[in-house]
Amino acid sequence: MLTAVIALAGLGLLGSLGLAIAARVFAVETDPRAEEIEEVLPGANCGACGKPGCFDLAREIARGNADIDACPVGGEKAAKAIGKIMGIDFSGGGERYVALVLCAGDNKEALKKYQYNGIYDCVSVDMFFGGDKACSYGCLGLGTCAGACPFGAIDILPEGIAKVDSDKCTGCGKCIEACPKGIIKLVPAGRNVHILCSSHDKGAAAKKKCRVACIGCQKCVKAAPEGAIHMDDFLAVINYDAEIPESVAGECPMGTIKVFKTEDSAGQETAGGGS
């Protein structure tokens, strides 16, 4: 009996020594700057940077494999703090981007083709003939984008359409990935004129399905500075590199072009053209 106990103790000791040696041999050295960088990152672990989590990004930055402004959520503030840790001057600070739902066709404006009573999820309803709205490009309004947003920046209005709070939006792009219609886009927060439609239907068909659809009349194209708005398969599309006067919204006979309250409020519509 004593011999067995001694043998087991010996095996345990050998095993412990083996583990200790293995830990030392195979230990992964961590750059202390990675921990410092992680401290200044938002800690959202949203994956918007393309990494699984904030520490993964911090480690890659410390290794020099990622830019110091790689975190879209932390923005300029985080980039400057990381720059100090890395000994790099950050002189960037480009324009902030926020998400925008390119549809204004809520339940009052857009025609429905059937009554949906299934799972409250945009992906689910989209599987039934492209959703309950007659316009196959319209916001389904069941909040899949809102559920995907790590920052609570999207609300579903009582009228059944998603709306982004640009003050909360960090431009992480999670909502873009979640939307089965592909109608959410990142736009410069400083722009306040937007075309809230994604329909590529011809004018008569688009108008029949939604009272605020782009009908491809091109009046906005003619009213805007050259190259500021172009046509893409019957849909007017804004070139956000160009400045567009607010007066262009008044040229739209459908009220599809909206002007937002301030230059940094892409989620707050205040005016638009319309008949």
Image (tube, rainbow, N blue to C red):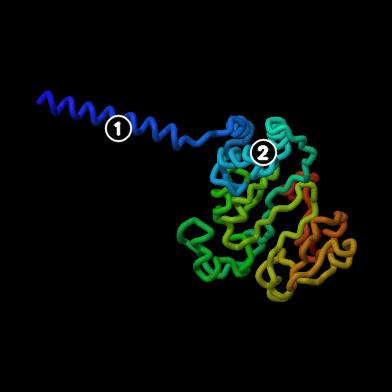
Q: Position of residue 202 (x, y in %)?
A: 72, 75
Depth order, front residue of 231/10: 10
Report whether 166 appears left or right of 142: right
> For the N terminus, which image quadrant?
top left
Question: Which disc, if any, is residue 15?
Answer: 1
Depth order, front residue of 76/158: 76
Q: Distance from label 2 to label 1 (Cα)?
A: 45 Å
Callout count: 2
Is the residue 105 above or below the residue 263 in the image?
Answer: below
Q: Secondary structure at mark 1?
A: helix
Question: Which disc, if any, is residue 25?
Answer: none
> Label 1 neighbourhood size at 10 Å, few (<14), some (14-19), many (20+)?
few
The mark nearer the N terminus, 2 or 1, is 1
Residue at far left of view: 1
Query: Which residue is at a point 82% across and 64% down the rendered structure image?
Result: 229
Q: Which of the two marks, 2 or 1, is nearer to us in this view?
A: 1
Report whether 89 appears left or right of 168: right
Q: Position of residue 112 (x, y in %)?
A: 58, 67
The residue that label 2 is drawn on is 74
Q: Quadrant of residue 240?
A: bottom right
Which amino acid does the dot numbered 1 rest on?
Gly
Residue at far top of view: 2
Depth order, front residue of 82/60: 60
